[in-house]
Amino acid sequence: MQISTTHNRMNTPLTISDGTIRLIVDPNVGGSFINFSTLLDDRWVDIMRTTPNDFKTSSDTASFLMAPYPNRIRDGKFTFQGREYSLRFPEKHAIHGDVRNRPWQVESTRPQGATMHLRSGDFPDLNYPFAFSVRQTFTVSNSALLVTCSIKNEGATSMPAGCGYHPYFNRALAGATENVLLKFNTEGVYPCQGELPLPTGGPRPLLASENFSTLRSLDVNLDSCFAGWDGVAEMVWPESKVMVSMHAASNMNRLVLFSPPGKTFFALEPQSQMIDGFNFLARGEPDTGVAVIPPGEELSVWFSLTVKTIS
C-alpha cells in the first residue's frame, strides 16, 4: 500500500497483524488508522473505508483519535470552574480535539502491537488551554483489535477532558451490493439542531428510526449522539458473511452514528462524553460524561473490534 508523502514524516506507518486481521497506523497523523482489514478467501478485504494515497489530514483516514475532547465545542468556547476559554476553530465550532493531525512519538513496536505518545508541551500552537499527555496502544490477537488510550493531566490544576474514536466502516465489503446490518442498545439520544448538529438538552427517548436494539439494516441517514450505550455493538455484512463486534470501556458510554446519504461508508464512534459536553457541564447538566482530571491523574479508555466469519 502506498502512503502519502505530503506529510513531514518522522516515522513510517506501522503494520500490526496476527495473520487474520491487519491494522496500519500512521504516527505522523495522530496514530490514525490507514487501513483495517481482514483476510477473507485468501485476500485482504477492507472493513474500514480505504484511505486515499494522497490523504491530507486525519479526516481522510479510516479512523482517528479525538482528544482531549471528542466531537464539537460550540463556537470554540467553554467555561470551566468559573473561567472562560476560547479555542481556535476552522469551522463553526471547535471539533475533534487537537492531537489527530500531529506527529506522535513511537515508544515500542512488535509484530502484533505498538505504543505511541504525545505531549502537548512539545507543540506551542496546540489548541487547548491545559497541559496534558496522551498515550495509545494497539494490540491484535485472535482476530481482535484492542485500542487503549490514556490522557494525563500534566498541569497544576484540574482539567476537563474526554476522548473518542472515529472509525469509518464500509457499508459493503469486497465489492458486494449488501448494506450493513447494525445492532446496539442505548437509553436515549440527544436532541440536536444546526447544520453541524449540537445538542439542545439532555437525552430524549428513541424514535423508531433510531432504535437499533435488534439487528437491522442501516437504512436511515443520521448524525446522532446516543446516551446510555451499554458498550456493545454488532456490524454484520450478510453477503460477505463477516461480523464485527465492538466493545468499549464502561466510561465510553456514548455512541455517535454518522450515516451520510450517498456515501459508501458510515461512522460508529465510541466516546466518553456527550457532544459539547464542556458547556453542558458548566450549565449543570447532571450526566455529561466529561472527566475532571486532577493534576497528575489520568483518564483511561479502551475499545475493541473482533472480526468473525458467519454462516
Image: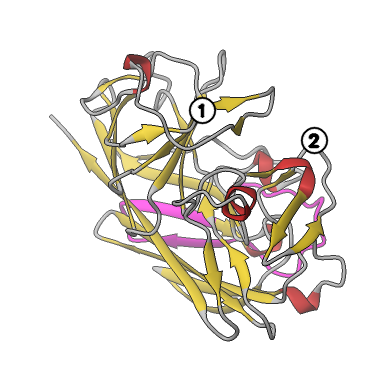
Tag 1: amino acid: Pro
Q: Nearer the viewer, residue 163 or 205?
A: 205
Identified at 36% across, 33% down, the residue is: 188
Disc 2 versus disc 1: nearer the observer: 1
Quarter-of-image position of residue 131: bottom right
User: Looking at the image, is 53 positioned above or below residue 7?
Assistant: above
Q: Nearer the viewer, residue 44 or 48?
A: 48
What residue does disc 1 label? 191
Q: Is label 2 in a helix, a strand or a loop?
A: loop
Identified at 64% across, 64% down, the residue is: 27
- Magenta region: 1-24
Q: Is residue 96 left or right of residue 305?
A: right
User: Looking at the image, is 264 positioned above or below residue 52?
Assistant: above
Residue 59 image offset from top left, x and y in percent: 67, 41
User: Looking at the image, is 5 positioned above or below residue 185?
Assistant: below
Q: Tell me, yes or no, if residue 45 can be seen here.
A: no
Tag 2: amino acid: Lys
Task: Let me know if residue 12 is in the magenta part.
Answer: yes
Residue 17 image offset from top left, x and y in percent: 39, 60
What residue does disc 2 label? 92
